[in-house]
Structure formats: C-alpha cells, structure tokens
Image (cartoon, helix red, strand yellow):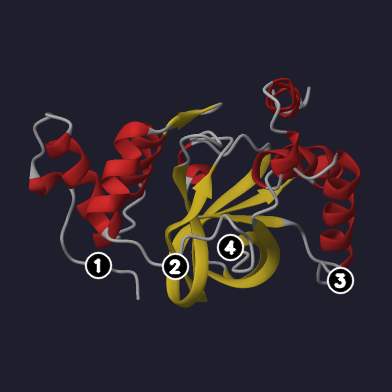
Amino acid sequence: MLENDSVRRAVEQSGHSAIMISEDELLQSLNKTLQEQPKNQPIWVFGYGSLIWNPMLEYVDKQPALIRGYHRGFYCWSRINRGSPENPGLVLALDHGGSCRGIAYKLKAEKKEKELLILWRREMLGNVYIPKWVRAETAQGVISAVTFVIDRSSPAYTGKMDEDRVVSIAMNASGHYGSCSDYLIDTAESLKQENIRDKKIFRLASKLLRCSGHASNTNDYPANDNQR
C-alpha cells in the first residue's frame, strides 16, 4: 500500500485530499531530514508505537532504546490511519517532557532511501509530526535516531486528554489501517512483549478491554513503570 501510495489515492477519492500534504512536500521533508542527519552515522529509526509491533522496515539491527526529553501519549487525532475526518481516532505521538522507551531499528545503508520513503508515507502523510534526530541510549551506547514528534501547532494536536475519553474514542473509530482500539491493544501487547513498562498505556488497554466486554486480567499489564 505504501510503496504504491494507495492510501493517498484512497483519501483523495473520498474527497479529503486537503488533510494531506502533497508528494512534493513529503519528499522535501524527507530530504531536509536526511540533510540534518549526523555525518558519517548509520540511519536508525526510533519506534514508540506501531513501529514496535509493525515496523515495516528492512533493518539489520534492532535495539531497545531510551530517549530523554520526550514521552509517548495519545496526543494525535488520526483522520486517515485509525479514524476518518468525520470520526477521528487517536494515535500515539511524542510530546515534550519526560522520557520514552522504545525500539531502534538500523536501516540497510543501500536501501535507506526506499525504506525512509515508505516510512514518510506512513507517518507524514497527514502533516502532524515533526521528524527529529534524537539521542537514543542503547546497550551498544548512544546512537542518533530519527523519530516523529507531534507538531503542537497542528490541528491534529489533542493536548492532554482524559483517559476515559481516550478509551471512548478508541472504541468507536477506525481508518485505512484498521480500528483505533486494535491500535491501542496491539501497542500495549508489544510493549509487554518487549519488556517496556508504560503504566498509562497498560491502564488504557485494561480499561478498553473492560469497556468492550472482554475479560481483562490486571496481571497482564504490570503496574510498575520504567518510563520516566
């Protein structure tokens, strides 16, 4: 879908092309980010949400990583991927403050342009994120990785939202990539599998399961939190 840019075409056919940036603007953003890459360094991508459970990247190394100065949260309205313009869903974004544990992926040097174009079509189509190079701490040492931070000036920025409202929105929204509720549960499950403890995400997943009538064992999502 992303290689063929079929998501863009589907949004255009639905009459909502105004919520996307053009392909030229997308390429300009990608080229600018590559120009800002630290010299003589491999390209790493830091994933903190769906990139953990569905990276869709051809990579040669994968490392647990910690970045400081940003934290993950449901701060982004999703009008394409997990919602629609009529019924927006929510997806994760990095916002200022705290820290965030995730997964860093090292791209194949010879395929970086192809892989990053797919990534940009996935993350930047709606023009809600700012690509950033961040310092990521791994077991191998500190690396430079590109990631996506919410643009607070964008209409897609939600600000802080009550947890019950997040759950209610997640239960009722879906988009071109599937339902918002699946996104939340898949993220919680992948964090647990990677031994990344995020008490807020786990709490939201437990509430969602209870509200949707599914049994939720609180032991499934550990309460202590390694994210600061």
- What residue is pinned by disc 3? 39
Lower sequence index among marks 3 and 2: 3
Q: Nearer the viewer, mark 4 or mark 3?
A: 4
State whether residue 124 appears in this view: yes
Vertical comparison of 26 with 13: above or below: below
- What residue is pinned by disc 1? 225
Point out which mark residue 150 bears: 4
Q: Which residue type does callout 2 highlight?
A: Cys
Lower sequence index among marks 1 and 2: 2
Vertical comparison of 10 with 70: above or below: above
Q: How many residues crowd around disc 1 within 10 Å: few (fewer than 14), some, or many (20 or more)?
A: few
* Mark 3 → mark 1, Cα distance in angstroms: 35 Å
| Left or right: 107 as drawn, with respect to 29 | left
Q: Secondary structure at mark 4?
A: strand
- What residue is pinned by disc 2? 100
Q: Which residue type does callout 4 highlight?
A: Ile
Question: Which residue is at a point 34% across and 62% down the rendered structure image?
Answer: 161
* Mark 4 → mark 2, Cα distance in angstroms: 14 Å
Q: Which residue type does callout 1 highlight?
A: Asp
Question: Which residue is at a point 70% across and 51% down the rendered structure image?
Answer: 127
